[in-house]
Image (spheres, rainbow, N blue to C red):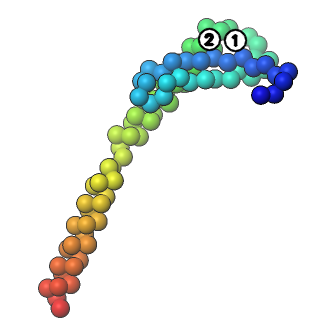
Amino acid sequence: MVKGVSRQIIMVDSPDPAMFEKAIFIIRDGKGGAGYSELLKEARSIAENYLRGNIERRKKRIAPVVYAAAGAALTGAVWLLARLIC
């Protein structure tokens, strides 16, 4: 830890604890004009958008087992074709 440096943070609980437990936002120095409630609202919004984006990406992902099964099936088909031709 660096001595003489103090930072203002906002800590937000996760809407879905399976993804992450807490989000910690470090506020820039001289962030005047914005009140704590505005900063907290913005931090919650960012955390929810991050979570929503990652859940959508997870749903679109194909399981590695599917890739392995497809590779095994293709290898078997090529082997069978080669065996029938020769």
Q: Residue at x 56, y 24 (%)?
A: 23
At 36% across and 46% down in the image, what residue appears? 61
Mark 1 = which residue?
34
Residue type at the position of mark 1: Ala
> As displayed, is residue 9 above or below residue 56?
above
The spot of residue 64 in percent (x, y) is 33, 53
| Pointer 2 residue | 38
User: SS class of the residue under badge 2?
Assistant: helix
Position of residue 83 in the picture relative to residue 64 (left or right): left
Among all residues in the image, which is located at the extreme right? 4
Return the x and y of residue 5 as percentages of the image width and height: 82, 22
Residue 86, label in figure: none
**Labels in figure, total:** 2
Who's the residue at 43% across and 24% down the image?
17
Residue 42 visible in image: no
In the rendered view, would you say 30 is above or below 50?
above
Q: Are marks 1 and 2 in contact (CB under 8 Å)?
A: yes
- Classify mark 1: residues with Cα within 10 Å, few (<14), some (14-19) or many (20+): few
Give the image location of residue 67, x and y in percent.
31, 58
Of the pair 36 and 1, the residue shown nearer to us: 1
SS label for mark 1: loop
The amino acid sitting under disc 2 is: Glu
Residue drawn where x is 56% and y is 14% of the image: 41
Q: Quadrant of residue 78?
A: bottom left
Q: Do we see residue 43 in this rendering?
A: yes
